[in-house]
Amino acid sequence: MDKSITLIGMAGAGKSTIGIKLANLLGFNFLDGDAIIEERINQSIQSYLDQHGGKEFTKIEEEVLLSIKLDKTVLATGGSAVLSDAAMNFLKKESEVIFLDVSYENISERILNLSERGVVRGPNQSLQDTYNERLSLYQKYADHVVINDGDTDACLKQLLVLLESFKS
C-alpha cells in the first residue's frame, strides 16, 4: 500500500489516536492537521476560535490542508475539514479518505466540554446540531467508512482489512 490515507470524522472520533497507530503499523508518516494549524497560528484552536470565529479558522484550515504533501502519510484532519470543498477534493485526489464513523451517543460521551474542545460551530449550536450538520459531509467525501464505536484495536483491525483489500 503506497497511497496516503486521510481520516475524517467528528471531534472525538479517534482520528489522531487511530492515525498514529495505523501509521506505525504501515510504516507511514503521521500528520495531525489540528497540530499543524496550532503551530501555524501559535495558539490553541479554541483560543483562535474565541478570538476570530469559525469562518476565519476554516480559511486557515483550508490553506493548511491544501499545502500538505502527502507521501506515504496518514493524515488525521480536524473535524471541520469537511467544511472546505477545495481541501476535501484535494485530499480525495491525493489519498484514500476514510470516515471514522462514531455514533452521536459515543461522541457526546467523549467530548465532555464542548466550549474547550476547539469545535467549529455556529453561535449556540449544540454538539448534536454540529454532528447532524456534518454527517452528510463526512459521507459525501469518504471513499470508505469504518465504524469506531468500539475499542481502538477493533477499529484498527477493520482498517487493516480494508487496506488489505486495496492490494487485490
Image (cartoon, rainbow, N blue to C red):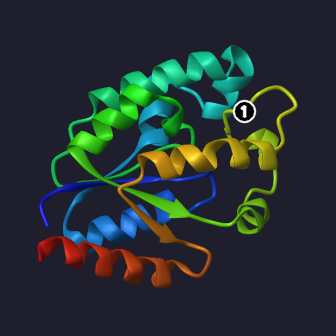
Residue 50: x %, y % from top left:
74, 23
Answer with left or right where residue 152 lies relative to residue 122: left
Q: Is residue 77 above or below residue 165?
A: above
Residue 22: x %, y % from top left:
33, 69
Q: Quadrant of the C terminus?
A: bottom left
Answer with left or right where residue 97 lies relative to residue 85: left
Q: Which residue is mark 1?
A: 121
Q: Residue furthest right?
A: 124
Q: Is residue 131 above or below residue 149?
A: above
Residue occupying image coordinates x 33% and y 35%: 89
Q: Is residue 26 above or below residue 62?
A: below
Q: Quadrant of the N terminus?
A: bottom left
Q: Total marks drawn?
A: 1
Which quarter of the figure has residue 134?
top right
How busy is the neighbourhood of tag 1: few (under 14 within 10 Å), some, or many (20 plus)? some
Answer with left or right where residue 130 lies relative to residue 162: right
Residue 57: x %, y % from top left:
57, 22
Which quarter of the figure has residue 130?
top right
- Work out whether residue 133 or residue 51 is closer to the camera in this orientation and state it: 133
Secondary structure at badge 1 equals: loop
Q: Is residue 98 above or below residue 132?
A: below
Residue type at tag 1? Arg
